[in-house]
Amino acid sequence: MPPQYANYWYEFENLVANLFRSIKVKKVVQNASLAGHQIDIYLEEETASGQVARTAVECKFYSKPIGKDIVSRFALIIDFLKKGGFIEHGLLISYKGYTKEAYEAAKVFNIDLLRIEDLEVRAYKYGPIDSIIEKSYKAPPPKFNKKFMFVLMSFDKENEDLYIYGIRGAAEKTGFVCKRADEIEHNSDIMKEILYQIKKALILVAEMSSGNLNVYYEVGIAHGLGKEVILITKKGTTIPLDLAGKNHIIYENINDLEKKLIKRLKIPYDERFIN
């Protein structure tokens, strides 16, 4: 079965990981946890000088070419991880290629872009890849980290630092790894994928300040499933009546949110969500 016929995001992710293994990459880890970030694939490759180059890879199983917005968001995570000394490189691998604007953004942010067919060409130099494809598609979905946190929030640009440094910063310091909906490498019904992530999450964090209807809907689903949801709201925001009785974290800025969220996550499980 050719890779362009992959049906699920995890088949695509398995394929990418196995292709890297086939070209003798020193270390390939799927669903790696780095500083509170859940990375699709983590690579360690030995350079010509004998050094080890570390790369965070994000796989995008989309039906359309990747645009500049996705590149820009990924670049924020890579910048965070580079500054922390966790990696040297960031790599996006797309199922359906990239737009011209995406390539331009990648140059600005120093992000590498790779199409799945380009990775296949590299792998073919080491031998046939039919068995690699078959093995990838037969493998089950990857296991989630036991302390997986799913974040529900709008994707406005003003929320990017809030997510990277406030929420993910708190996750890193409390042993959680997190992801939000725009990081899901899907090629199907997005709500089906979000529901899957909600079910798998140990805990959810929902940013309510924007009044985004999708976030309210997803919070309702999570509550209906009996999941634990930490509601966070910026100071001065009017909380809807139906949610006013819930325990919200009211924050003033990113640093304030990080401190308060860390404190909440450190509360024992049985006490954390008592209103």
Image (tube, grey):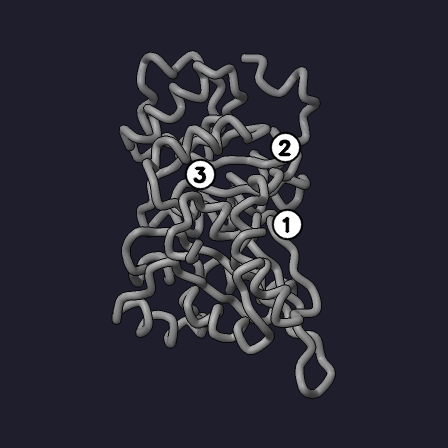
58 is higher (above) or lower (below) than 45: above
Label 1 crowd bin: few (<14), some (14–19), many (20+), radius 10 Å: many
**Is residue 2 something one can see in this rendering?**
yes
Per the model, the C-alpha gap separating discs 3 and 1 is 28 Å
Residue at image location 61% in from the left, 59% down from the top: 42
Q: Residue 233 in the image: x percent, y percent?
A: 41, 31
Mark 3 residue type: Glu
Q: Residue 200 in the image: x percent, y percent?
A: 55, 30
Residue 43 found in image quarter: bottom right
Residue 118 found in image quarter: bottom left
65 is higher (above) or lower (below) than 38: below
Residue at image location 48% in from the left, 33% down from the top: 197
Q: Is mark 1 on a helix, strand or loop?
A: strand
Mark 1 residue type: Ser
Q: Do the residues labelled 3 and 1 touch (CB within 8 Å)?
A: no
Residue at image location 34% in from the left, 22% down from the top: 239
Q: Residue 76 in the image: x percent, y percent?
A: 45, 60
The residue under label 1 is 33
The residue under label 2 is 263
Q: What element carries label 2?
A: helix
123 is higher (above) or lower (below) than 163: below
The residue under label 3 is 252
**Residue 98 shows which numbered tag?**
none
- In this view, the residue in front, 258 or 79, is 79
User: Which mark is first along the chain, 3 or 2?
Assistant: 3
